[in-house]
Amino acid sequence: MTHDLTRREALELTAVAALTTAFRWTPSDARRASDLARAARQGAFQAKFFTPHEWETVRVLVDIVIPRDERSGSATDAGVPEFMDFMMNEREDGRTPMRGGLAWLDHESRERFNKTFKECVEQERRAIVDDIAFPKRAKAAHSHGVAFFNMFRDLTASGFYSSKIGIADLDYQGNEFITSWTGCPDAALKKLDVRYSD
């Protein structure tokens, strides 16, 4: 069976794993952060961990990781920056890598384009992200950027797919009472390239 994962499908698969392994965050931590982010969006949100400059950089970068598309809103639409701010306040082990990675992005941007990452145009931002998004292809000189981006991408996916927008994007059908089980829908079986044995 061969199935080429889309970028969004790959992010879906890493969402929970990022919380439980890389940052030692539990699924309940993710739900709590998502709930708090949703509540924060209803009022004027003030970041507690991120500086104003970092906050703007995070908002740009999360939407590079998960942009708005025909299926759903972007990472900022889903409240991922708010989710990240909450997580950084709750989990000390992520603070230094996050702050250092955002500083690395600005340093790299200044080296290449003489401006901060958030001041770069989309093509310039993509050039930097493309150099750190694929660990096997990345230059050794970009190892710090690669480590940061791996963490950041996983955290973005975790925040997005634990949000209302992300759950809708997954077409999650759980939490519904089923009176009788008639089997997996044909469309799902076909997508997975599996069938019931005779």
Image (cartoon, rainbow, N blue to C red):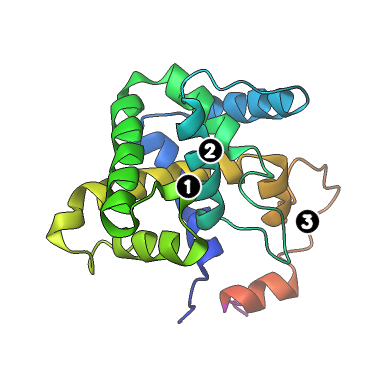
Q: 96 or 57: nearer the eye?
A: 57
What is the crowding at mark 1: few (fewer than 14 residues within 10 Å), some, or many (at least 20)? some
Question: Does residue 70 lie above or below 179 as drawn?
Answer: below
At 48% from the left and 41% from the top, the residue drawn is: 57
Label 3, label 1: how far apart the Cα atoms are: 51 Å
Q: Amino acid at mark 2?
A: Glu
Separation (CA) of disc 3 from disc 2: 48 Å
> Residue visible at 64% across and 37% down?
79
Name the residue that disc number 2 marks.
56
Q: Disc 1 designates what residue?
A: 118
The magenta stretch spans which residues?
Answer: 193-198
Residue projecting furthest to the right: 179
Q: Earlier in the sequence, mark 3 or mark 2?
A: 2
Nearest to the eye among marks 3 and 2: give it: 2
Q: Magenta stretch containing residue 196, yes or no?
A: yes
Q: Which mark is residue 181?
A: 3
Residue 5 lies left or right of residue 108; in this view the side is: right
Residue 144, above or below 35: below
